[in-house]
Amino acid sequence: EEEEEEEGKKRKRRTGKTKHETKMIETFEGQEYEIMCLKIREGAEEENDNMRVATVDATGRLTVCKVPKTKSGDIEEEVAEEKAELLYKATPKLYKDYGTFGTLGSPGWAGLSFCPREENNIAVCKLWTRTIDWFEQDRVVRTINLLELPTSIAHMETPHSNQSVLCIGENNEVVVYDHRVDKKNGQVGRVKQVGSDNVKHQIQALERASFSGNSVLCCAGKERMVSVIDPRKWTARYRWKNCAKYEVTGLYAPRTIEGFVCVASLDYEILCGSYEKGKLGGGFTFRNDARVVGIGGAKFGDKNDVVCTWTDTGKLTAAKISVASLISAEDKIVK
């Protein structure tokens, strides 16, 4: 009888978890076009029982939801009744001006980034219109037209003003924008030829990281090289050359392991290495059974990170990584 009761509790938890996830998915339904980017806000939201999730579709339309946090295996019936709450949906300025999307051409890539300083500030850049929209909740506060096609987006903090700026990958350069600045179309910095000397070698991944207590920006693309930008001078501080066999499509910098970055490329393999040393340097490699099409991660506790990859066959793989114990700070080994 005790075994039957225990089995019944497990079945109830599994059923509750399915209901919970289904209701969260329903909140994001109704998208007319493919979702191009999904981000979870890091920072203040993590201290609460909810986290903020935002998506942008192929037309640049933004959807922001509040998702309750739950722990696997600890979902009771009352928790299962909770669901994701739609906070707001926002439309780009050009879409509002023209009324119909058909006049703007074909849909394409779009990216979004949460502002780390301002909770309700989100930036959305769109490839086909060459624009950046800054949203304050569902209201567009500023729109900037770009000269080149944007291919990546990320916020980062500057050490001088202690403010956040927006970094955009345009061809083989990283251009820095601040929506509070009126001059030069909001441009406050530019790092030339950071990805490659070839203009056609686009920067396809930007990732904010922390090194020696300061914020740095990791960027990579078709050149198969990770460059680390120092915002104090807006120059490349470190370069990890030939980090992958094919062009890099995604990066993730572990939040608990400084000086390391995880690299995903058009291959089966994921690499985690030291950009300071320009090699694996105590990192690791992992080989999937299919081609990797995306990478992401999050902080897991105080000393661990979870890195997730998904492949073109629909397989999702998650790995928990941390610094190996009994290793000096100069000789980090990631396990």
Image (tube, helix red, strand yellow):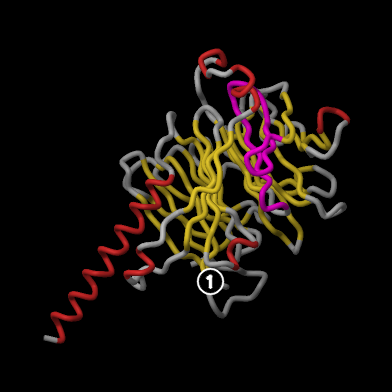
Measured from the top left, where is residue 55 in percent x and y?
51, 42
Q: Residue sitting at 62 percent across and 29 percent down?
A: 92
96 horizontally vs 80: left or right: right
Residue at 24%, 69% in the rendered image? 12
Q: Residue at x 37, y 43 (%)?
A: 311
Q: Quadrant of the N terminus?
A: bottom left
| Residue 101 x/y as whole percent | 53, 19
Secondary element type, mark 1: loop
Q: Where does the magenta region start and end?
A: 118-140
User: Would residue 220 be seen by someone viewing this image from the given angle?
Assistant: yes
Query: Residue 5 location, x and y as percent?
Result: 17, 81
Residue 217, relative to residue 129: is it above or below? below
Q: Which residue is mark 1?
A: 301
Q: Looking at the rendering, which quadrant does residue 211 occupy?
A: bottom right
Q: Nearer the viewer, residue 156 or 252?
A: 156
| Drawn side of residue 204 relative to residue 174, left or right | left
Residue placed most toward the observer, 234 or 40: 40
Give the amino acid type for the residue marked by disc 1 in the picture. Answer: Gly
- Give how far across and how far down residue 255 sits, in percent: 60, 61
Placement of 99 over or under 245, stated as above or below: above
The quarter of the picture where residue 6 lies is bottom left
